[in-house]
Image: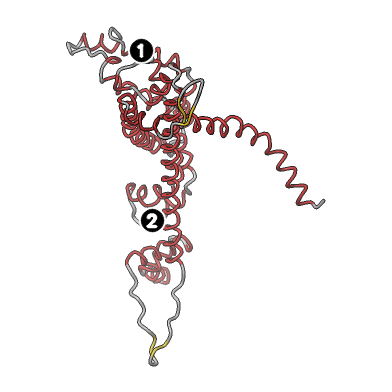
Amino acid sequence: MSLRKKEALVGLALVLPFLGGFLMFYIIPFGITAFYSFTAGISGMYFAGIRNYVEVFGSHAFQLAAYNTFRFMAAGIPLIMVISLVLSLMLYGRTGHTRAFQSIFLYPMVIPIGSVVMFFQVMFSRYGVANRILYQLGLPEPDWLESGSAFGVLLFLYIWKNCGYNIVLFLTGLNGIPREFLEDARLNGAGKWQYFRYIQCPLLMPSFLFVFVMSVINSFKCFREAYLLGGQYPHESIYMLQHFMNNNFASLNYQRLSVAAILVFFIIFALVILLFSWNYYQEQDMAGMLKKKSLPARRTKIRGGRPAAQPRETMEYREYREYRGMLLNGPDEKIRRTGGGRGQERRRRR
């Protein structure tokens, strides 16, 4: 037996436990769920086609749950990404207390969720601390968890709990950017906004992608907090798709549960695929642009004894070439181009 075959067999033996667990706990249950979504009945199941999908889409409970879930994602994901990015930029470069702040922001992730929800119930219950403060100030006292304000409470809980993890991810991406880029940008007269827009943002695209995916996953995992805050049937503003699936499971309606689970899977799958595709094409466009700009100009064929007219150099390419020369030759390149080097040389000779 050749060495390559032995290595392939050893690799297959090492991967088999993972493949077996993935097949048993993910692939097979997903196939069973897809099969249930096209059947009807409990004991004597029969093929029902897409009838379950039509009933679920026409259900008012499903429409309300889907609306609240997408509204929560549309409000929570941009907010948590912006807040995390701003806080990470504030912490970036502060070597003295960065570790302490990172630990403080990560504390909500290690605190048991039951304790966190109990604290929020004490704060926002009908006779809680928040209403006591409003009463002392002479302001109206809303019922936070039994009105439309429950959506804001859940949104605040989601951001407070998951913001620290995103801050650490953004800080990791910021620390991976070479310091030389900042120094060269300052020598070229770039401000903080220009450095952030043209250098940090493009280089943080992988971090943005990962933070977005994790934020989407955590937004679907926020059902625990919503369930503990409002119970099995909370206020309609925080009635999510997970509530819909949990209530159908309790009533043994596995067909509607399977349909909702399949739809949630395809929603997450479509979002991730679209984001990865967008990121891939952005990287390809940037790589093609840099490659095109970094290649030397080719000699054109001579027509009629004279060389063909060369295209005029654009301002964008000229700035890029000067910046590239500074990266390769250092800050003296800018002095040489502006003629400052000659003046300095004359002064030295004098």
Amino acid type, mark 1? Gln
For this orientation, the residue located farthest to the top is 127
Depth check, mark 1 against mark 2: the one in front is 1
Question: Which quadrant would residue 49 be assigned to in this image?
Answer: top left
Residue 120: image location, x then y, percent: 36, 15
Question: Which quadrant would residue 238 be assigned to in this image?
Answer: top left
Render colour scheme:
secondary structure
- Identify which residue, 149 or 65, lies in the foreground: 65
For this orientation, the residue located farthest to the bottom is 305
Question: Which quadrant would residue 40 be assigned to in this image?
Answer: top left
Asked whether residue 39 appears in the rendered view, the answer is yes
- Mark-to-mark CA distance, 1 and 2: 54 Å
Task: Residue at 34% x, 72% y: name it.
Answer: 313
Task: Residue at 71% x, 38% y: name it.
Answer: 14
- Identify which residue, 312 or 331, lies in the foreground: 312
> Which badge, 1 or 2, is on the more N-terminal residue?
1
The label shown at residue 187 is 2
Q: Is the C terminus in the top left, top right, bottom left or bottom right quadrant? A: bottom left
Amino acid type, mark 2? Leu
Up-down: is 215 above or below 323? Answer: above
Residue 253: image location, x then y, percent: 44, 21
For this orientation, the residue located farthest to the right is 1
- Mark 1 sits on what residue? 121
For label 1, the SS is helix
Q: Residues within 10 Å of mark 2 (few under 14, many from 20)?
A: few
For label 2, the SS is helix
For this orientation, the residue located farthest to the left is 138
